[in-house]
Image (tube, helix red, strand yellow):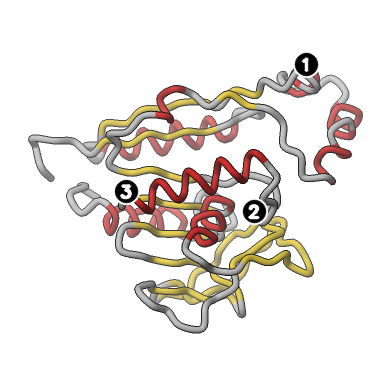
């Protein structure tokens, strides 16, 4: 790879149970071992309504504490968070637009408004981007593709899909999905029935499934292929 300039990657994550934090650490170590300059930034949960109940793990009364946020979840009303300043700057070779809960079609949800604006900015700048689950849905919406609510949510479902020339067992956790377009246009598409499992564009990849999940059998290999495609100078 180019010795003059290391690819610069920022991993932005939210964690309560510390599981996502461990995944971020593993991703950072793997990228650093391949010559990348990696930063990590954690999203902070700041909502005064629930921060005292949901900011510690393990929870003292998990059923009662989780039940307290159900009304807001049923209305798709996200809690307030603080985005780390590192995630609000430019200069990164790759952006991972990650997953999260909520209805990507809800134009009144501040989180979806911010996510759509972020996806639009990445596309306009031609920023190399790996978009996963909700990030994939928001990016596809900005590309003009149609979103729908699945009749039955995929929550911990493992589904075999033809993924860019290989059949892979993929792990899904989604209530919403992107409908496959009739014409591929500039994209390379992977279908899961009428829905998109993945999409490749000139400088971006969208994955509806979770490559980091234990339900995705070859998740690391899938991530490696996409990183090599998006960052040609990386030593994979």
Which residue occupies 33% across, 44% down? 94
Question: Quarter-wise, where is residue 20 in the image?
Answer: top right
Location of the N terminus (image quadrant): top left
Question: Quarter-wise, where is residue 92 in the image?
Answer: top left
Where disc 2 sits, the SS reads loop
Which residue occupies 40% across, 59% down? 205
Specify the label residue 52 is tagged with.
1
Pointer 2 or 1: first along the chain: 1
Looking at the image, how many numbered discs can be counted on the residues?
3
Q: From what the image shows, is residue 36 above or below residue 132? A: above
Between 184 and 199, which is closer to the camera in this rendering? 184
Question: Quarter-wise, where is residue 115 in the image?
Answer: top right
Where disc 3 sits, the SS reads helix
Residue placed under numbered mark 2 in the picture: 104
Q: Position of residue 32 (x, y in %)?
A: 28, 34
Q: Label 1, label 3: how many angstroms apart (C-alpha)?
A: 39 Å
Specify the label residue 27 is tagged with.
none
Q: From what the image shows, is residue 231 above or below residue 92? A: below
Q: Position of residue 95 (x, y in %)?
A: 38, 43
Q: Position of residue 210 (x, y in %)?
A: 55, 54
Between 192 and 218, which is closer to the camera in this rendering? 192
Residue depth check, mark 1 versus mark 3: number of the one nearer the observer: 3
Answer few, some or many: residues within 10 Å of disc 1's Cα (few below 14, many 20 plus, some between 14 and 19): few
Residue placed under numbered mark 3 in the picture: 125
Pointer 2 or 3: first along the chain: 2
Q: Label 2, label 3: how many angstroms apart (C-alpha)?
A: 22 Å
Q: Dots 2 and 3: beta carbons under 8 Å?
A: no
């Amino acid at each position: 790879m180019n010795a003059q300039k290391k690819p610069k990657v920022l991993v932005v994550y939210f964690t309560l149970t510390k599981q996502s934090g461990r995944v971020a650490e593993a991703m950072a170590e793997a990228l650093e071992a391949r010559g990348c300059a990696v930063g990590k930034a954690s999203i902070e949960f700041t909502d005064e309504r629930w921060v005292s109940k949901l900011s510690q793990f393990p929870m003292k009364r998990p059923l009662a504490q989780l039940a307290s946020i159900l009304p807001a979840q049923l209305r798709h009303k996200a809690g307030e968070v603080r985005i780390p300043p590192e995630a609000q700057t430019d200069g990164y070779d790759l952006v991972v637009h990650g997953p999260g809960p909520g209805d990507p079609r809800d134009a009144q949800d501040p989180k979806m408004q911010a996510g759509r604006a972020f996806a639009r900015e990445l596309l306009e700048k031609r920023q190399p981007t790996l978009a996963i689950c909700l990030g994939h849905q928001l990016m596809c919406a900005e590309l003009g593709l149609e979103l729908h609510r699945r009749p039955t949510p995929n929550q911990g479902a493992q589904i075999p899909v033809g993924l860019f020339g290989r059949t892979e067992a993929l792990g899904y956790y989604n209530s919403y999905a992107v409908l496959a377009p009739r014409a591929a246009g500039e994209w390379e598409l992977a279908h899961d029935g009428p829905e998109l499992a993945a999409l490749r564009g000139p400088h971006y990849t969208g994955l509806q499934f979770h490559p980091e999940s234990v339900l995705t059998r070859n998740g690391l290999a899938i991530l490696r292929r996409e990183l090599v495609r998006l960052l040609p100078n990386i030593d994979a």
